[in-house]
Amino acid sequence: MKIKNILITILLTCFVSMASFAKPKPKVLVFCKTAGFHHAAIAVGAPAIMQLGKQNNFDVDTTTNAYKFTADNLKQYAAVIFLSTTGDVLNNEQQEAFEKYIQAGHGFVGVHAATDTEYDWPWYGKLVGAYFKSHPNQQDATLQVVDRNFIATKHLPATWRRFDEWYNYKWIADDLHVLIKIDEKSYTGGENGDNHPMAWYHNYDGGRAFYTELGHTDASYADPLYLKHLLGGIQYAIGK
């Protein structure tokens, strides 16, 4: 009996020791501050990302508080998600902290109105990859998935028909790896021609950045295809 108890003690000690060395789950910060138009879908988008985290082994914090953008606070996160942020959401000190965060090798995800954010901060514009110009009425359109090898698009059909709010851009960066384009012949109001990207990723200033224009509607966050698309972008930004 004594030998059995000793063996159990040894096994428990080894288990506790191994658990102490287990890598902690990555954590992401969902930032939802709006200083312009406030998208109602934020209210369903943030919980949807939290659910993705529970299902895919990463933790999620959400905030509208720009004062969370300090070096000490940001370092706990593998990636930061700008969920339909709008306008001027960070002051100069917060911008500097976020720049250093990305330069340290962390990740960024921009969702929908993230391109309608921080027009006077060129570094951010290059990070997110484009700046919003306008959009027509919400309507069905055909998306062309031009790269189906990437984690955020490998599950998608080559041609994807869906309803959303489709952005036109006043400026688009030239270093983007485009994943999805929109066929302007399939809807009315497009202004970027044949090269009208809707989702992309790129390495930028030491970090990783993913953006998807999709996600204006509440229904997006109950759509399995869209949620897996968004999940893939988050996983890329985390570094998986």
Image (cartoon, rainbow, N blue to C red):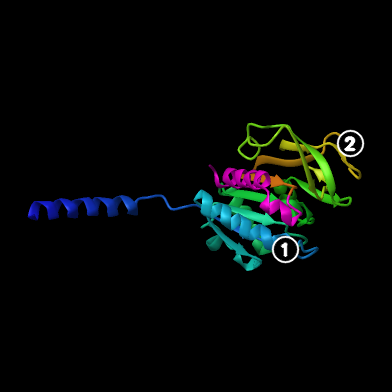
Where is mark 2, residue-wise?
Answer: 185
- Residue type of the residue flagged with mark 1: Val
User: Is label 2 in a helix, a strand or a loop?
Assistant: helix
Question: Which residue is depicted at the point 33% across and 54% down?
Answer: 20
- The quarter holding residue 191 reads top right
Question: Which residue is depicted at the point 69% across and 56% down?
Answer: 83
- In the image, the segment drawn in magenta is 215-240
Q: Pick out the residue farthest to the left.
A: 2
- Residue type of the residue flagged with mark 2: Lys
Whether residue 214 is in magenta: the answer is no
Q: Is residue 32 visible?
A: no
Q: How many marks?
A: 2
Q: Is 6 placed left or right of 29 in the picture?
A: left
Residue 110 rendering spot, x and y as whole percentages: 69, 51
Residue 220 rendering spot, x and y as whole percentages: 71, 51
Q: Nearer the viewer, mark 2 or mark 1?
A: 2
Residue 93 rendering spot, x and y as whole percentages: 65, 63
Q: Is 157 placed left or right of 55 in the picture?
A: right
> What is the CA distance from the residue labelled 2 to the residue labelled 1?
35 Å
In front of the other: 53 or 34: 53
Residue 236 rendering spot, x and y as whole percentages: 59, 43
Q: Mark 1: give few (<14), some (14-19) or many (20+) Cα within 10 Å.
A: some
- Numbered circle sitting on residue 89: 1
Question: Which quadrant does the N terminus fall into?
Answer: bottom left
Q: Mark 2: give few (<14), some (14-19) or many (20+) Cα within 10 Å.
A: few
Whether residue 216 is in magenta: the answer is yes
